[in-house]
Amino acid sequence: MAETAIRVSEEGYLEDFTQWSPEVGAEIAAEEGITMTDEHWKVIDYIQDQYKNEVPLTIRKVGKSGVIDIKEFYALFPGGPLKKASRISGIPKPVSCI
Amino acid sequence: MEVLKPVPEEKTKKEAKLKKVMIIVSKATLENVYASFILANGARMEGIESELFFTFFGLEAITKSKLEHLHVATVGNPAMHIPTMLGGLPGMEAFATTMMKKEMEKLDIPPVDEFLEILSASGVKMWACKLAMDMFHLEKKDLIDDLEGVLTVGDFYNRAHGEGTHLMFI
């Protein structure tokens, strides 16, 4: 892959969504110890759609999305699914408490 | 690919990370139950283990026949900004509860029954206190199916081992 500089926040979230590509997402996932599968990408697509429509994300919404249930969400992105999936999606850190 | 990250401030102290929270739910007023649930769920969202121990009146929050009818306390709560005498009038609790539930729905906070399902799916372990169950004549079948089990206070403390475990009483 060509060497590109990606700007991220102190917590590792992309600062500019236009810099995101599936390769960047996969690399961030690898940093989190996650190997991306089709199931993971379906969730990332959903999260990016919500972000583009300016819908704030919550665990409850993801659980009701029809894409994945909450148990599977925790299993796919262990140790903080909403944060990790947001990071991989290239969107800012979620601000929700639920 | 190069990742440009701001250089964090140098840490002088070794960080003691929070690894597990154990929350004791002793009251079943809506505000206390939600506080406990949000703390437990929020912990899981951060990758922190969490457990809930329901004791005394807190048991109502996991009693099948009661959990959908929890109320906000309108008496003895100065932050309600209504005179205590008014708070005691019939219907005040129901009114305040309806108002609060409306506000919470706007924030995408689920009702108690759905919240319990979310907690269970998120890996929060939920326990009932044996002594309180005996006191209120409750049996396991009266409580939610997602309950992990029934514990004595000693059992509960024995689960609190390990570095980075914190206990909270609500």
Image (cartoon, rainbow, N blue to C red):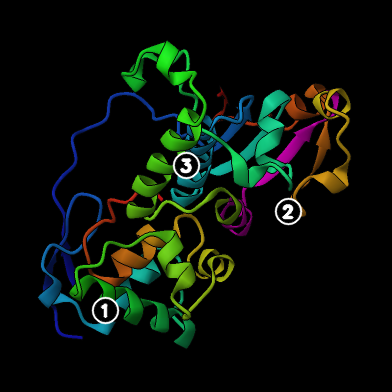
Residue A41 coordinates in the image, percent (x, y): 39, 83
Read off the magenta span. B116-131
Question: What label sits on residue B146 in the rendered view?
Answer: 2
Tell me the kind of residue under disc 1: Asp
Q: Is residue B138 left or right of residue B41?
A: right
Q: How many marks?
A: 3
Q: Residue at x 31, y 70 (%)?
A: A88
Question: What label sits on residue A49 in the rendered view?
Answer: 1
Query: Is residue B65 located in the magenta-colored stretch of the structure?
Result: no
Task: Please indicate, yes or no, whether residue A34 appears anywhere in the rendered image.
Answer: no
Q: Is residue B103 above or below residue B84?
A: below
Q: Which residue is mark 3?
A: B38
> Quadrant location of the C terminus of chain B?
top right
Q: Residue at x 85, y 22 (%)?
A: B135
Task: Please indicate, yes or no, whether residue A56 appears anywhere in the rendered image.
Answer: yes
* Mark 1 crowdedness (10 Å alpha carbons): few <14, some 14-19, many ≥20: few
Residue B81 coordinates in the image, percent (x, y): 31, 18
